[in-house]
Image (cartoon, helix red, strand yellow):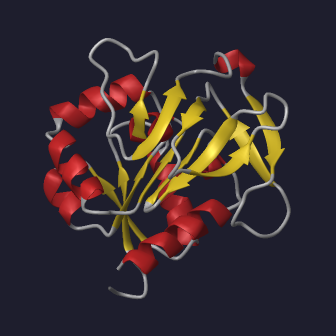
């Protein structure tokens, strides 16, 4: 692999441009992914925040469901923020009609758990594995993790509600919040490091 790993951003809906910026700042060579051939060309993938039911419908429309599941099963590093966390979950207790997930992390995730758009907020989080000051996390219609399996590492909990909001299981990373909407690229640096390690 080149010194800059090729990291895709699922470019169907959501915070695509923001993740591309953060990945570039974190030392990756980012690219939008909409087709199976584009997925084949990347070393890791980010699934952005957005609307999880819409993203799933577009994953199916673009023929990406099975290619994504295969790459994930083969160990491709993947990072999901907000809607991306929902899509990486193994279980959704409140799935919309026809909504499926990619099942990359052994967790149960509740959609829109912190409330609607008007309930958006910011919170300082202590993140395991990331040095420096607390991370200022932006929560927008955010999910939370209701249950994490034994193999899932909890990286952060939201201090007021006490809910799990950042996890890692092997090559898969997920946050309930939107690190791409801040100037703090430490989570993207962590993920780019995961991609380099897996090469």
Q: Is residue 142 left or right of residue 83?
A: right
Q: Position of residue 61 (x, y in %)?
A: 17, 31
Identify the residue at horizontal 21%, vertical 59% (top origin).
Answer: 38
Q: How many marks?
A: 0
Quadrant assignment for the C terminus: bottom left
Q: Is residue 48 left or right of residue 136?
A: left
Q: Is residue 128 above or below residue 67?
A: below
Q: Position of residue 177 (x, y in %)?
A: 64, 40
Which picture quadrant has residue 133? bottom right
Q: Is residue 174 above or below residue 147?
A: below
Q: Is residue 6 left or right of residue 184?
A: left
Q: Farthest front residue?
A: 150
- Which sits in the foreground, 7 or 76? 76
- Which sits in the foreground, 153 or 83? 153
Q: Is residue 161 above or below residue 71?
A: above
Q: Position of residue 113 (x, y in %)?
A: 62, 21
Quadrant assignment for the N terminus: bottom left
Identify the residue at horizontal 73%, vertical 19% (top origin).
Answer: 119
Q: Position of residue 95 (x, y in %)?
A: 40, 18
Q: Is residue 49 left or right of residue 71?
A: right
Identify the residue at horizontal 57%, vertical 71% (top origin).
Answer: 26
């Amino acid at each position: 692999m080149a010194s800059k790993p090729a990291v895709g951003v699922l470019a169907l809906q959501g915070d695509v441009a923001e993740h591309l910026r953060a990945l570039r700042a974190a030392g990756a060579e980012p690219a939008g992914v909409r087709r199976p051939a584009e997925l084949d060309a990347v070393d890791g993938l980010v699934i952005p925040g957005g609307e999880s039911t819409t993203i799933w419908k577009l994953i199916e429309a673009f023929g990406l469901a099975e290619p994504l599941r295969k790459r994930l099963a083969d160990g491709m590093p993947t990072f999901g923020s907000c809607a991306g966390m929902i899509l990486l979950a193994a279980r959704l207790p409140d799935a919309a009609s026809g909504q499926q997930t990619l099942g990359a992390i052994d967790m149960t995730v509740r959609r829109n758990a912190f409330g609607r758009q008007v309930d958006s907020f910011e919170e300082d989080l202590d993140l395991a594995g990331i040095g420096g000051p607390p991370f200022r996390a932006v929560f927008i219609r955010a999910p939370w993790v209701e249950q994490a399996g034994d193999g899932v590492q909890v990286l952060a909990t939201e201090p007021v509600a006490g809910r799990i909001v950042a996890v890692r299981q092997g090559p898969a990373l997920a946050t309930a919040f939107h690190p791409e909407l801040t100037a703090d690229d430490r989570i993207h640096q962590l993920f780019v490091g995961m991609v380099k390690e897996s090469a």
